[in-house]
Amino acid sequence: MPRFKTGLMNGLIDGKGFDTTLVLLSLGYLLVFSAFPLIFNLIMSFQQVDLFSLAQLVRPFVGWDNYRDVLTRPESWPIFLNTVKFVGISLLAQVSVGFALALFFQQSFPGATFLRGLFLAGWIMPALVVGAVWSWVLAGDYGVLNYGLQSLGLVRDKIFWLSDPAWTLYAVIIANVWLGIPFNMILLSVGLAGIPDDLYEAAKMDGATCLQRFTTITLPMMRAQLGAVISLGTIFTLQQFDLFAALTQGGPANASNVFQYWSWQLSFENYEIGQGSVISMLMILFVILVAVVYVRSTRHEQAS
Amino acid sequence: MNPLKIMFLSALGLSGSWTMAHSAPVELDLWTIDQPGEYHYVMAREFDQQHADITINVRTVQFRDVVNDLARAVATGNGPDVTYIDNPDMALFAPRHLLLDLAPYVRKSDIVDIDRIFPGPLASVRFDDSLYGLPRGSNTLALYYNADMFEAAGLDPDQPPTTWEQLYQYAKALTDSSENVYGLAFSAINSEEGTFQFLPWVQMGGGDYNNIATPGAKRALTLWTRLIEEGLASRDTLIRSQYESTGTFNAGNAAMAISGPWELPRMSEEADFNYRVAMLPVPEKKAKRASALGEGVNTILANTRYPKEAFEFLEFMHANMDRVWNEFGMLPASRVEVKDPNFPQAYAVFDESMKYARTRGPTPEWQKISQTIQQAVQSALTGQVEPAVALENAQLKIDRILD
Amino acid sequence: MSIKRIILLALALVFVSIYLFPLYWMYITAMKGSTGIFAYPPSFWPEHPQLAIIEVWQRHDMGRYLFNSLLIAGGTTLIVTVMGSGCAYVLSRLRNRWMDVVLFAVLMMQVLPSSLMITPLFVSFEQVGLTDYPRTAVILAQAAKMLPLFIVLVRATFLQVPRELEQAALIDGNSRLGAFLRIMVPLARNGILVSSVLIFLQSFGEYVYSRSLISERALQPATVGLQSFMGPNSSDWSGVMTYAAIYVTPILIVFVLLQRQIVSGLTSGALK
């Protein structure tokens, strides 16, 4: 960190003071308000912490004990796999549906922009309400989804979306994709709107097909936006907590449990706070991976 | 309230204001899970009115945040003077001397007689010779049943099931999948409520939280598994809270439901059938009864500046125990006479059940054990593990936790 | 041509109605008794619709809660937009190892969910006395949570603005700051506005920080007030849904109209 600072100081002397100030303002703010909790959690993952020493920093260090304890529990591997599935499928679905909807609403027809705006509803409804409504939609006996599927003749027996271990994770994914769509769609819409029309017209004149225009103009021009929504989407998905609390509580028997919910259960239900911090540190590994990919992907921006 | 008590309480109030007259006014901070208009707000207001020099500042904390918020407040030195604590969480605070030992105060008190407190609630506040709180009220479990459905199925509504086997037979007779009616609704959710519902079955079967793999407990879990597997109870029992499960009972989609007295206001308004309440069925005739113990405790934090005044407030609340049923929907935690109880039939059953209500724990490791029990129940109900094996595995884990 | 437009509109209506079903269900549940929730087959229109808007509004003093929510969301959005735009701009223009590090750090800063950030934040806020200004404390904490999101999003928008325009402005004699404010910000306003809207909406729904940092009822936002319907053993769902409907509806209308301005009205112009 100190070297980093001197680097920026040199930049300041080089006459890039304007840039440096703008960056430092935000970075400084983040370091004050976000870095401290991060380090606090990191330290806790190596300490023996209980409910009543949670608010202090001086606690007995236990080395890698917490890590060993958590990682040798039989449930840790299935929960890890669930987390990967949850993030992967959610992301794939919400980016592709969001992108498809953004492209769809990009076409001109009456009410297009108004109808697109209605998708913001997913972001405005309070988490408590979203969770409750989805729990009623997905309920096995009185759920609307089963009612619809049965009325349409698509299924014969009711599916217990939330309590059948084979379905439960996917049920939470459905609700999470619903939540993620507006974010992806609105932001990708902004990106699409930023692509100059003459590019498309030129391509049309050259006789490019719809698909060709998409792959040669839309995708490359949307690179930065896609990188942004994918990396942020990953982080959001990794923080999705309310839906698990409202729909399945991670059950039945951990069938739908993921790291973020497990970490909360350990820290705030079982009061195994050191162990809960271990899980949150493992989640950071996910994000490091995403951040590295994202930062690397921004290199190409320069080239294009 | 009888006239004698009013006189006594106002005398108490007078003496209180007299002793405080020449000192600075006392402010007591009270943390509660109640909302304005509910128990603690009403108690605080009435106490305030009788004590000119004591002001009580009430703050609502969400039920699930109480322990975390209290622990943090205690650590940063900002704790309240008086607080609500859920009964199984008492064991977290008691051994750390964070709560004021009320035993010396109670010995001198004319109002509190701990021998009148039911054994279950008392066990949640008494640790060795110390007394760390006074139960503010209680709740427990019973069996609600739809008498109309009983009649339609040819069962006698005056003879609700009394044994586990009978419960199973009744559930079978009452299930009607073509009408979307299940025989029984209960909760095996992956949260404290799931343990709250299952533990009494373990205790009736001769076990307890630290002895979970008894033959009786295995029988209970096998019965639960059969109820789910044979479609006598919904698979969604695993994700429904008690209130949701009973909601399906109110809607006519379940013929019986296991839940507590908090259901009564909604049920009386929304269930358009004849419902009644019975005690929880026991393993076999004449077996020992057990029931769950819910609700919390009024406690004083050890570092309060005003232990005397805080205890006066606790005494005041305890003296109003006869009001908790009709006004606040809680069962009295001690033997008091409730005049003209609301829902008299239900009250009689719940009041009787209170004699058998047993606390969860007490152990400071309660939360971990509770989670272990929920996991065991859920893995059996989903058919992933045999009920007996699930409980044996749970026992191994619990032994490690308690070690 | 017009047939195509009609088909598109019809499709759009289908998509929107599928997507908005949960919103519809929120309104319907607000009008049902709580037992109606558990009925099968589900009723898509309540038999005796009853909407206790005025009762819920008054009994829960929603005006005050909503004012606090607006204050917190507005304050957060202001801080984030002012600070984040500059940072995002620089990150979109400069490429070197340090900027990689900054970008990486910015992403890492929002990795922890609020529920895990709150304890250390609470403790440190208490140390410096910030807990005496609880709404400010929530704004500061929430701004830190939202800033990385804003920077990453707006950075992508700045990238779409051609460098030549900025260069031209500098040659015209603008200072760096002048070029940034007069040329770059207006050209990226779509992205900035949309991102600010998302930040505003997220902060309007903020719950974890508010419930921990604001103990005084009069200062709490609507999300915390909503919890008063949830008891330890019972929950008043039609109350929850009524309360939610009261606050979701006006915001939804405002932002649907606003995003229409943002995404459609302003797009054309400068970029071409």
Image (cartoon, helix red, strand yellow):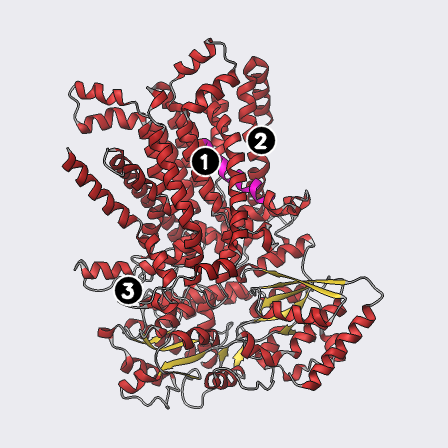
**Residue B365 point in image, percent of width and height:** 56, 64
Q: Chain of mark 1?
A: C
The residue where tag 1 is placed is C196
Q: For the residue marked with disc 2, what is the amino acid?
A: Gly
**Residue C240 point in image, percent of width and height:** 44, 59
Task: Judge by depth and name the residue closer to the eye, C230 or A9.
Answer: C230
Task: Give residue C43's mark.
Answer: none
Which numbered disc, 2 or 1, marks the residue closer to the eye? 1
Q: For the residue marked with disc 3, what is the amino acid?
A: Pro
Question: In which image quadrant can residue A21 be found?
Answer: top right
In the displayed structure, would residue A266 be above or below residue C156? below
Circle 3 packing at 10 Å, graded few (<14), some (14-19), many (20+), is some
Image quadrant where one finds the N terminus of chain B: bottom right
Query: In the image, which residues are magenta?
Result: C137-151
**In the rendered structure, are the residues bearing label 3 and label 2 in contact, judged by CB atoms less than 8 Å apart?**
no
**In the rendered structure, are the residues bearing label 2 and label 1 in contact, judged by CB atoms less than 8 Å apart?**
no
Image quadrant where one finds the C terminus of chain B: bottom right
The residue where tag 3 is placed is C42
Discs 3 and 1 share one subunit = yes
Q: For the residue marked with disc 1, what is the amino acid?
A: Ser
**Residue B175 point in image, percent of width and height:** 27, 78
Count of numbered tags = 3
The residue where tag 2 is placed is A28
Residue occupying image coordinates x 76% and y 70%: B308
In the displayed structure, would residue B252 be above or below residue B62? below
**In the rendered structure, are the residues bearing label 3 and label 1 in contact, judged by CB atoms less than 8 Å apart?**
no
Secondary-structure class at tag 3: loop
Does residue C204 appear to the left or right of B32 in the view shown? left
Discs 3 and 2 share one subunit = no
**Residue C181 point in image, percent of width and height:** 49, 21
Q: CA distance from mark 3 to mark 2?
A: 53 Å
Counting residues from the start of the chain, the first of labels 3 and 1 encountered is 3
